[in-house]
Amino acid sequence: MFGTLGFSYTGLLFLLMLFVPNIIWTGRQPQGYTAENEDKVLQIFERAGEALTCCCSLVFSDFNIHKWSPWSLWLAAAFIIMLLYEAWWVRYFRSERTLKDFYSNIFGIPLAGATLPVIAFLMLGIYGKVVWMLIATVILGIGHIGIHIQHKKELEG
């Protein structure tokens, strides 16, 4: 429930799937993107959630692959969600890279660039039964998804 300390290669894989496209994005941001007007409280939640989620991903071995059981479906689902996240990035990088592209949906999932990784890490936390990861992803989700909602509202109106 609270987690077994030890290195998680699964967590590392998820973080690589998260960070690589984000690093590429720093040189390919959408035209007109700015973080100037972001809500400061949401930024605090986002930064704290990012740090906590990254730490949890690496330091709890509960996320590593175990003997197959129905519980393993949580890990499979989390991985599929991360693959959708990668597909969303590929679509974004192939687009004109506008703000509309950046705040787009995929397969009906709103704000896919923000929601998919939060959902995947939440599922990873459920799979590992690590309450700290669940708390971290809720904090991350409040900040990260909240900021994306704010940006999308500004874009629409």
Image (tube, rainbow, N blue to C red):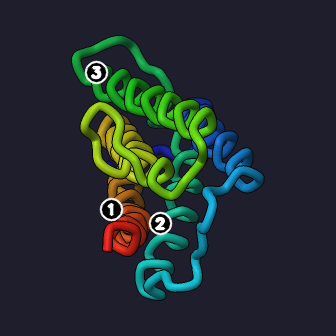
Residue type beneath disc 3: Leu
| Badge count | 3
Name the N-terminal-most of marks 3 and 1: 3
Residue type beneath disc 1: Val
Q: Where is residue 47 drawn, in percent x and y? A: 54, 72
Name the residue located 61 percent from the left edge and 33 percent from the top edge.
Answer: 94
Distance from Cα at disc 2 to Cα at disc 1: 8 Å
Distance from Cα at disc 3 to Cα at disc 1: 21 Å
Left or right position of 51 against 105: right
Q: Quadrant of residue 14?
A: top right
Q: Are marks 2 and 1 in contact (CB under 8 Å)?
A: yes
In the rendered image of this protein, does residue 148 appear above or below residue 68?
A: below
Residue 2 makes an appearance in the image: no
Residue located beneath label 2 in the image: 49
Name the residue located 57 percent from the left edge and 31 percent from the top edge.
Answer: 90
Which residue is more in the foreground, 60 or 97? 97
Residue type beneath disc 2: Gly
Outermost residue toward the right in this view: 27
Residue located beneath label 1 in the image: 138
Residue located beneath label 3 in the image: 73
Q: Where is residue 77 drawn, in percent x and y? A: 32, 26
In the rendered image of this protein, does residue 152 appear above or below residue 23?
A: below
Q: Quadrant of residue 39?
A: bottom left
Secondary structure at numbered mark 2 = helix
Q: Label 1: few (<14), some or many (≥20) within 10 Å?
A: many
